[in-house]
Amino acid sequence: MADDVAELNPSLIMAASLIYMSSIDGTIAQQEWGQLKTVVGGDDDLLEAGLDYVRDTPLDKFLQDASPMLNAEQKKCVLLNVYDSLLSDGSIEPEETKLFDKFLDKFGVSKDSLSSDLATLAVKNNTKVVGI
């Protein structure tokens, strides 16, 4: 890993988490990129730091380092934003589900504890019901 990689903090963990999820299928779809920019408040420096971090850090190392740095509320916030990103392009790929389950496991959060939140996000992202 390069010496100039940014030090993890909660905002970088959020950005990197979203980038790991958005890029799991090899590309970042336009909807996913829009979601990412929205979540980080358009902070291009944070996005660049997140992209650099993801390029230089294997996922398992990231999850190992990130989890103990977050409190329970921060973990839930990251997980829900990651799930929202997973849904944002209109399809759920098996590798996205597998990655989300890995986040849950490494963050020590059960899917059952988030079930109502995840269901709400699924409804939010099902824009087909309104013809979009």
Image (cartoon, rainbow, N blue to C red):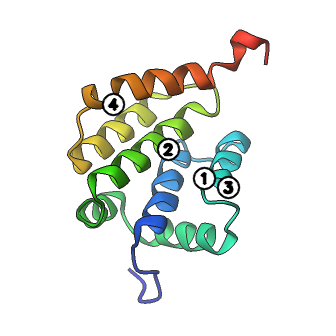
Residue 81 tag number: 2
Mark 1 burial class by Cα count in 10 Å: few <14, some 14-19, many 20+: some
Mark 1 and mark 4: span between their CA atoms?
19 Å
Q: Which residue is mark 3?
A: 37
Mark 4 and mark 2: span between their CA atoms?
12 Å
Which residue type carries mark 3?
A: Lys
Going by the picture, which residue comes out furthest to the right? 131
Residue at 56% from the left image edge and 19% from the top image edge: 123
Which residue type carries mark 2?
A: Asn
Mark 3 and mark 1: span between their CA atoms?
6 Å
Q: Which residue is mark 1?
A: 39
Which quadrant of the structure image shows residue 32? Answer: top right
Picture coordinates of residue 23 (x, y %)? Answer: 55, 49
Secondary-structure class at tag 1 = helix
Q: Are marks 3 and 1 in contact (CB under 8 Å)?
A: yes
Q: Which residue is mark 4?
A: 114
